[in-house]
Image (spheres, rainbow, N blue to C red):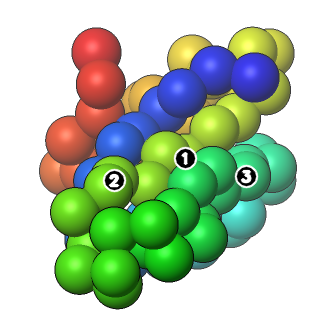
């Protein structure tokens, strides 16, 4: 799996996942429950991961919708 997106904003993650799902690209959110460690302050970012085979297409989908990616 490759990291596609890292953010503290859960709405960006939800929007990105909806866009990817619409294109048939499976994604997985890492670090969802890490907020327990920081006291629910939202300091620790969540990561959105995709399969390596889907990475190029997923990057294109997010860029086309003005969602900032890692690279």
SS state under label 2: loop
In the displayed structure, would residue 16 be above or below residue 48? below
Q: Quadrant of residue 12?
A: bottom left
> What quarter of the picture does the N terminus occupy?
top right
Q: Earlier in the sequence, mark 3 or mark 2?
A: 3
Q: How many angstroms separate mark 3 from mark 2 (CA)?
A: 14 Å
- Using the rendered view, name the quadrant where residue 32 is placed: bottom right
**Where's the C terminus, which quadrant?**
top left
From what the image shows, is residue 54 above or below residue 5? above
Which residue is pictured at 80% across the width and 49% down the height?
A: 26
Marks 3 and 2: which is nearer the front?
A: 2
The label shown at residue 28 is: 3
At mark 3, the secondary structure is strand
Counting from the top left corner in percent of width and height, residue 57 is at 59, 27
| Residue 45, label in figure | 2
Residue placed at 63% from the left, 20% from the top?
2
Could you tell me residue 28's position as x and y percent? 73, 52
Left or right of residue 12: residue 29: right
Q: Would you name the residue on which mark 1 appears? A: 48
Q: Is residue 61 left or right of residue 8?
A: right
């Amino acid at each position: 799996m490759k990291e596609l997106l890292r953010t503290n904003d859960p709405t960006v993650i939800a929007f990105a996942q909806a866009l990817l799902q619409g294109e048939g690209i499976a994604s997985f959110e890492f670090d969802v429950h890490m907020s327990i460690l920081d006291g629910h302050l939202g300091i620790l970012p969540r990561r959105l991961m995709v399969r390596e085979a889907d990475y190029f297409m997923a990057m294109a989908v997010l860029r086309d919708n003005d969602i900032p990616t890692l690279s």
